Amino acid sequence: MGELASRSQLRMDFVRAAAVLIPAVLLLGFLSGRTVPSGEQNGWYAALAKPDFTPPGWAFPVVWSVLYVMLGLAIAMIVSARGARLRGLGAALFVAQLAGNLAWTPLFFGAHRVDAAFLLIVAILGLSVLATIVFAQIRRAAAWLMVPYMAWLCLAAALNWEIGRLNPDAERVVQAPVASQMIR
């Protein structure tokens, strides 16, 4: 069994990894976004003052969907890199940053913890940078797939920071009551 894998075997390893990991990352991102109402569907968030550079609401699900597909491709490249010395470290860093990413939405939109969410996004960004550095030593394309994600994290961190600055009492903001459809 000391044979080297053929190019077609390596390609199939990647295809299998991508077929599992892209949908898995996309699904996890979707589920994280569904744990609590987010965006303008969240009454608390809708009541907050937001910076002028806040993207339109429709942009978030579109951008996150594309980014999650790119993240799935990146980790598939790493997982399928047979014999790569840093493969385990790269995968561990990826999983750690993804876990933080998935926890951010419930922390920010659900718990209304703007300051804690900012610290978390900074940690996510740091772990993503480390993962990207490791990815670059395994598969450069995987590292490049992480770059748009890190750019979006920078924007998200800036939004998080500004929302905290514009709403110093954000944790105590009460969402507007939902109008009842009941007829008396």
Image: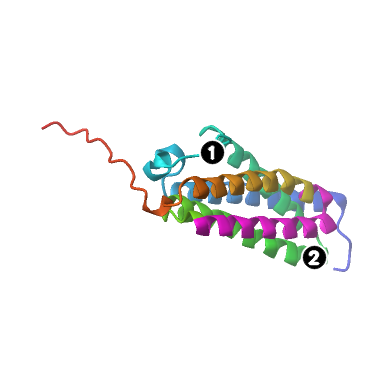
Nearer to us in this view, 129 or 23 = 129
Q: Is residue 80 visible?
A: no
What is the secondary structure assignment of the residue under circle 2? loop
Q: Tell me if residue 67 comes above or below residue 119 in the rendering.
A: above
Quadrant the N terminus occupies: bottom right
Name which residue lies at 76% across and 56% down. 78
Q: Which residue is mark 1?
A: 51
Q: Quadrant of residue 137?
A: bottom right
Q: Is residue 113 visible?
A: yes
Nearer to us in this view, 100 or 171 = 171
Three-letter amino acid code at disc 2? Leu
Q: Position of residue 97 (x, y in %)?
A: 63, 58
Which residue is the extreme one toward the left? 184
Residue 86's disc is: 2
Label 2 near label 1: C-beta < 8 Å? Answer: no
Q: Which SS does the magenta portion mostly show? A: helix
Q: Crowding near pointer 1: few (<14 within 10 Å), some, many (20+)?
A: some
Looking at marks 1 and 2 on the same chain, the residue that comes earlier in the sequence is marked by: 1
Is 120 part of what is drawn in magenta? yes
Quadrant the C terminus occupies: top left
What is the secondary structure assignment of the residue under circle 1? loop
Is 178 part of what is drawn in magenta? no
Range shown magenta: 115-142
Q: CA distance from mark 1 to mark 2?
A: 40 Å
Name which residue lies at 49% across and 49% down. 31
Q: Quadrant of residue 83?
A: bottom right
Q: Position of residue 21 (x, y in %)?
A: 64, 51
Q: Crowding near pointer 2: few (<14 within 10 Å), some, many (20+)?
A: some
Q: Position of residue 49 (x, y in %)?
A: 46, 40
Q: Position of residue 12 (x, y in %)?
A: 76, 50
Name which residue lies at 74% across and 60% down. 130
Q: Quadrant of residue 42?
A: top left
